[in-house]
Image (cartoon, grey):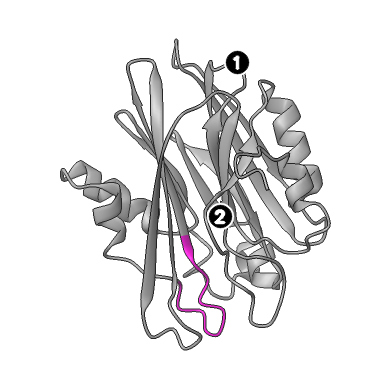
């Protein structure tokens, strides 16, 4: 068993009907750019009625058809925000929890210690989060998952992973293993995946690998470590 194998993310996802929401963070193979990707999937009409919108440097989920919104509490949020040398990405309103904590001098892990998994019994969907910290022409990154400690949702287990940036390597964390009832929560460490130099190749590969019925939106950004120049790609199924 090669524990250091770097996987093709498309091969990890293809044929899996429901990996839920997912975050990818890593560095391109030439070592010149940071990569962040975030996607959402949905099974219910309420979840599928969404689009990604970029506004003032932040990424938001918003209703596609406002008249069809049933419950906005867990599906409408800021998914990505930037603060100074930090880039925060999460699958819920804990983006703002981390953002406000950092503004007040707090930390990524400390902010998430105040949160737990989503209250959507019986799934208890985990909250997944990531943060890049840029410094001296490079970056480090942290990833987190908050998930139920048992089938009753009686307590929250918290896991934080901290990584150096290595050329060609990214880490992928998602909310679910696959579809089910209840839906099985992601297990283990974030998966090791390859980050190509070409943002379009990566975006297309990831989007095409996601289940056609359940995928909703995908956002990918590459940040040039030398210049700070940002490239962004955004795909909405509801267009």
Residue tagged 2: 62
Q: At 33% across and 66% down in the image, what residue appears?
A: 115
- The image quadrant of residue 3 is top right
Percent x, y of residue 62: 56, 55
Q: Are marks 1 and 2 in contact (CB under 8 Å)?
A: no
The extreme top residue here reads 226
Percent x, y of residue 232: 59, 29
Q: Earlier in the sequence, mark 1 or mark 2?
A: 1
* Residue 170 falls left or right of residue 101: right
Percent x, y of residue 170: 57, 36
Residue tagged 1: 30
Q: Is residue 27 above or below residue 227?
A: below
Q: Main secondary structure of the magenta part?
A: loop
Q: Secondary structure at mark 1?
A: loop
Q: Secondary structure at mark 2?
A: strand
Q: Is residue 202 above or below residue 161?
A: above
Q: Is residue 28 above or below residue 71?
A: above
Magenta run includes residue 124: yes
Give the magenta part as a residue range: 118-127
Q: At 51% across and 79% down in the image, what residue appears?
A: 120
Percent x, y of residue 98: 31, 50
- The image quadrant of residue 187 is bottom right
The residue closer to the viewer here, 93 or 132, is 132
Per the model, the C-alpha gap separating discs 1 and 2 is 35 Å
Q: At 23% across and 50% down in the image, what residue appears?
A: 101
Residue 237 in sight in this render: no
Residue 66 in sight in this render: yes
Q: Is residue 157 above or below residue 13?
A: below
């Amino acid at each position: 068993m090669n524990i250091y194998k770097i996987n093709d993310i498309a091969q990890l996802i293809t044929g899996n009907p429901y990996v839920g929401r997912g975050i990818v963070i890593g560095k391109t193979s030439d070592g010149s750019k940071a990569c962040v990707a975030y996607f959402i999937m949905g099974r219910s009409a309420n979840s599928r009625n969404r689009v990604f919108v970029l506004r003032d440097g932040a990424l938001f989920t918003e209703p596609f058809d406002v008249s069809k919104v049933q419950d906005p509490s867990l599906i409408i949020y800021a998914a990505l925000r930037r603060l100074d040398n930090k880039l925060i990405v999460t699958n819920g309103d804990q983006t703002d929890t981390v953002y406000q904590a950092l503004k007040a001098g707090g930390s990524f892990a400390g902010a998430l210690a105040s949160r737990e998994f989503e209250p959507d019994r019986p799934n208890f969907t985990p909250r997944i989060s990531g943060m890049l910290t840029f410094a001296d022409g490079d970056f480090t990154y942290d990833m987190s998952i908050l998930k139920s400690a048992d089938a009753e949702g009686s307590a929250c287990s918290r896991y934080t992973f901290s990584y150096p940036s290595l050329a060609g390597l990214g880490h992928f964390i998602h909310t679910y293993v696959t579809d089910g009832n209840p839906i099985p929560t992601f297990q283990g460490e974030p998966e090791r995946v390859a980050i190509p130099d070409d943002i379009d190749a990566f975006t297309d590969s990831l989007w095409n690998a996601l289940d056609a019925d359940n995928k909703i939106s995908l956002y990918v950004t590459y940040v040039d470590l030398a210049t700070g120049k940002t490239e962004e790609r955004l795909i909405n199924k509801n267009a």
